[in-house]
Image (cartoon, rainbow, N blue to C red):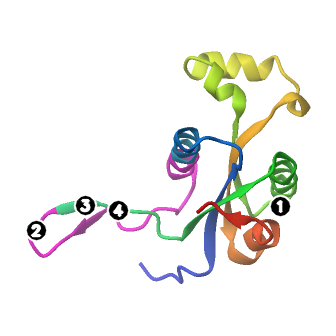
Amino acid sequence: MDYDYRERKSVIVLNAKLKIGVALTVAAHLGTSMGAFGEDHMGVEWLTDRSGVRHRGLPRYPVEVFKGKVAQLREALNKARETPELMVVDCPSVFLDTAGDGELSQTLEDMDEQELDYMGILIHGPRDAVDSLTSRLRPWW
């Protein structure tokens, strides 16, 4: 498995006003979506320590977490959607108000995109393209 881990990256951008528990939930869902639907994001499936204990593999590329204002989040999201080489995952706030995938799907079908508020987004792709959209944001910590 030859690759340069520095050539690509993932950035999660969370609404700076989220409470920590909600922020962690949003980040977990964004990462799960990327891992499930993205291509070639995961590293080795199993890692084994010297004791022989197996550990599930982790993403092969760095994942950084930033925070931003609502307007910054939407700007990064819109620009990322216009960049074909980027994978984009978003988490609208209606996610918290719905019970399950079916209800979320129906709620989104009944709304225009401009009505959505986003709690977080994930952008994955070539490092330069990701950095061009997120370099002005502050780290979450």
The nearer-to-camera label among 1 and 2 is: 2
Spot occupied by residue 139 in the image (x, y as percentages of width and height): 65, 66
| Callouts 3 and 4 close, C-beta under 8 Å | yes
Label 1 or label 4, whichever comes before in sequence order: 4
Q: Disc 2 designates what residue?
A: 52
The quadrant in which residue 83 appears is bottom right
Is 40 left or right of 121, judged from the image as shown? left
Above or below, comparing residue 74 to residue 110 in the picture: below
Q: Amino acid at mark 1?
A: Thr
Q: Disc 1 designates what residue?
A: 83
Spot occupied by residue 101 in the image (x, y as percentages of width and height): 58, 23
Q: Disc 3 designates what residue?
A: 55
Circle 4: is it few (<14), some (14-19), or many (20+) Cα within 10 Å?
few
Labels in figure, total: 4
Q: Which residues are magenta?
A: 30-53
**Local secondary structure at mark 1:** loop
Label 1 or label 3, whichever comes before in sequence order: 3
Q: Is residue 57 magenta?
A: no
Q: CA distance from mark 1 to mark 2?
A: 43 Å
Q: Disc 4 designates what residue?
A: 57
Q: Amino acid at mark 4?
A: Gly
Above or below, comparing residue 50 to residue 78 in the picture: below
Label 2 or label 4, whichever comes before in sequence order: 2
Q: CA distance from mark 1 to mark 4?
A: 29 Å
Circle 2: is it few (<14), some (14-19), or many (20+) Cα within 10 Å?
few
Residue drawn at the location 62% of the way across and 60% of the way down: 140
Q: CA distance from mark 3 to mark 4?
A: 6 Å
Q: Amino acid at mark 2?
A: Gly
Disc number at residue 93? none
| Callouts 1 and 3 close, C-beta under 8 Å | no
